[in-house]
Image (cartoon, helix red, strand yellow):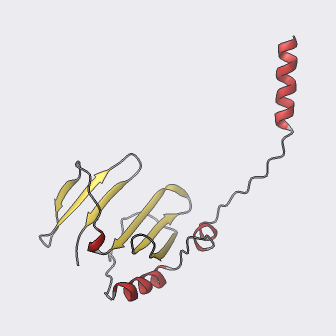
């Protein structure tokens, strides 16, 4: 009986803790109003082109997945790069991301990366990890 009383008292005390949690559901609020300085894709591309002094060609076709939002940013911290994120506000699993950096900052590919021949004769690499698949193209 004593154990039940202590357990009941403990659960009542936990239930009285005032928890103030803020849920952010709006992707625009998360991306555009964060300290990470995301912006519209065209603005980020323009900043990147000015920095690299080179025209950046983005893919003309995206995967046949419904995206509700896209955001971009140019970051010049450790590695200057353009990041573009495509997201679906209804799905936490639909996230397509493009990172563009200078060949000066080549990434080290893991040993299990597979090689793929592209239509123009160049090669690309891909590898998968638990939560994502990375496709790497070294071009221009």
- Please tell me whether residue 37 is drawn above or below residue 87 in the rendered image: below
Image quadrant holding the N terminus, namely top right
Residue that protrudes farthest toward the top in the picture: 1
Give the camera-side residue of 37 and 56.
Answer: 37
Q: Quadrant of residue 50?
A: bottom left
Query: How far from the left and from the top, in percent, is residue 97?
Result: 41, 65
Q: Tell me which corner region of the image, top left, top right, bottom left or bottom right, holds residue 27.
A: bottom right
Residue at horizontal 55%, vertical 75%? 37
Residue 56: x percent and y percent? 33, 82
43 vs 12, left or right, is left
Residue at 64 percent across and 69 percent down: it is 29
Q: Is residue 78 left or right of residue 35?
A: left
How many labels were placed on the picture? 0
Q: What residue is at 56 percent from the left and 62 percent from the top?
A: 89
- The quadrant the C terminus occupies is bottom left
Residue 126, position as x, y percentages in the image? 26, 56
Which residue: 83% across, 14% down? 3
| 81 horizontally vs 138: left or right | right
């Amino acid at each position: 009986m004593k154990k039940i009383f202590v357990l009941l008292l403990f659960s009542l005390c936990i239930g009285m803790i005032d928890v103030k949690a803020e849920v952010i559901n709006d992707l625009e609020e998360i991306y555009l109003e964060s300290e990470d300085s995301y912006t519209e894709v065209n603005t980020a591309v323009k900043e990147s082109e000015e920095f690299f002094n080179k025209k950046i060609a983005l893919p003309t076709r995206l995967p046949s997945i419904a995206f509700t939002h896209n955001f971009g940013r140019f970051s010049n911290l450790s590695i200057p790069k353009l990041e573009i994120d495509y997201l679906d506000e209804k799905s936490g699993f639909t996230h397509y991301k493009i990172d563009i950096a200078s060949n000066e900052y080549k990434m080290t590919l893991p040993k299990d990366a597979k090689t793929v021949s592209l239509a123009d004769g160049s090669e690309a690499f891909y590898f998968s990890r638990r939560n994502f698949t990375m496709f790497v193209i070294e071009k221009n």
